[in-house]
C-alpha cells in the first residue's frame, strides 16, 4: 500500500517543545512525516537553516518515521516533490485560526489535491511560540520547559554573542 506522507512546515527559529509535541502526534497518524524547514532569505532568522535542522534532528532522533528537509520554494511545490498528500499545521488558539485558514485556502487554490490538516499541541504548549521564546530568553527568563535543552543553550549563547557585538 502507498505510504501516507505529511509535511509539517515552519520556520522553526528555533524549534520548541510545542513543535516537537506536534511532530510526535503526527508520527502516530501518518506513515511518514517530513518536517519542512523554510529557508526564506526575506525573513531574518536568528539561527541558520543548518542549525534549525540540527535542533530538530536531535529532538526527533527517537522517531523513526520523521525526516527533516529544507525548502525554499512554494510549500505546495515542495509537498508534491516529496509525494506528500497532507500539510500539517498546528493550532494553538483561535488567534492562529484566521491566518491559517487563509493559508489553507491559498494552498488549496495552488494545489487542489493537497489537504491541510490542523492539529492541536498539548495544552501545556498552547502559549509557546518561537517568537515568545526568543523574547523571554532575551530578558533572561526561564525557557527550560518550552524548548529542547540544546536549543536553550544555543539561544542564550547566540543572544549573548549578539549583545557582545552590539
Ligand atoms: O513557522 P512559520 O514562520 O509560521 O511558517 C510559515 C511557513 C513556512 C509555513 C509559510 O511561510 C510557508 O508556507 N512558506 C512557503 C512559501 C509559500 O508556499 N507561501 C504560500 C503561501 S502565501
Image (spheres, rainbow, N blue to C red):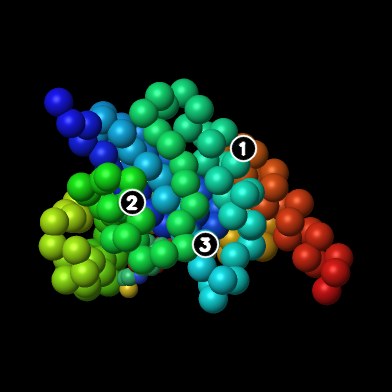
Q: Residues within 10 Å of mark 2 (few under 14, many from 20)?
A: few
Q: Is residue 70 visible?
A: yes
Mark 1, secondary structure of its residue:
helix
Discs 1, 2 touching: Cβ within 8 Å: no
Could you say where residue 164 lies in the image, as x and y percent from the top left? 86, 65
**Mark number, residue 81:** 2
Query: Is the CB atom of the residue marked by disc 2 within 8 angstroms of ligand 1's nearest atom?
Result: no
Mark 3 or 2, nearer chain start: 3
Could you say where residue 124 lies in the image, as x and y percent from the top left? 37, 43
Q: Residues within 10 Å of mark 1 (few under 14, many from 20)?
A: some
Query: Which residue is pictured at 76% across the width and 51% down the height?
Result: 157
Query: Is the CB atom of the residue marked by disc 3 within 8 angstroms of ligand 1's nearest atom?
Result: no
Mark 1 or 2, nearer chain start: 2
The Cα–Cα distance between marks 3 and 2, rounded to whole angstroms, is 16 Å
The Cα–Cα distance between marks 1 and 3, rounded to whole angstroms, is 23 Å
Q: Which residue is mark 3?
A: 39
Query: Which residue is pictured at 83% across the width and 74% down the height?
Result: 166
Could you say where residue 95 lies in the image, as x and y percent from the top left? 28, 68
Mark 3, secondary structure of its residue:
loop
Which picture quadrant has residue 5?
Answer: top left
Of the pair 20 and 108, the residue shown nearer to us: 108
Would residue 33 appear left or right of 117 to someone viewing this image?
right
Query: Which residue is pictured at 47% across the width and 32% down the height?
Result: 60
Mark 1 or 3, nearer chain start: 3
**Mark number, residue 149:** 1
Q: Residues within 10 Å of mark 3 (few under 14, many from 20)?
A: some
Which picture quadrant has residue 9?
Answer: bottom left
Would residue 158 appear left or right of 71 to someone viewing this image?
right
Numbered disc in front, either 1 or 3:
3
Amino acid at each position: 500500500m502507498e505510504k501516507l506522507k505529511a509535511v509539517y512546515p515552519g520556520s522553526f527559529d528555533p524549534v520548541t517543545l510545542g513543535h516537537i509535541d506536534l511532530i510526535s502526534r503526527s508520527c502516530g497518524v501518518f506513515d511518514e512525516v517530513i518536517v519542512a524547514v523554510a529557508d526564506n532569505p526575506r525573513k531574518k532568522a536568528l539561527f541558520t537553516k543548518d542549525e534549525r535542522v540540527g535542533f530538530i534532528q536531535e529532538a526527533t532522533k527517537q522517531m523513526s518515521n520523521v525526516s527533516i528537509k529544507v525548502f525554499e520554494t512554494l510549500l505546495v511545490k515542495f509537498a508534491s516533490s516529496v509525494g506528500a498528500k497532507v500539510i500539517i499545521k498546528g493550532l494553538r488558539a483561535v488567534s492562529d485560526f484566521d491566518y491559517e485558514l487563509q493559508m489553507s485556502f491559498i494552498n488549496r487554490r495552488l494545489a487542489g489535491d493537497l489537504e491541510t490538516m490542523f492539529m492541536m499541541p498539548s495544552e501545556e504548549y498552547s502559549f509557546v511560540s518561537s517568537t515568545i521564546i526568543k523574547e523571554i530568553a532575551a530578558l533572561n527568563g526561564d525557557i527550560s520547559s518550552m524548548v529542547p535543552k540544546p536549543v536553550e543553550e544555543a539561544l542564550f549563547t547566540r543572544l549573548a554573542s549578539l549583545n557582545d557585538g552590539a
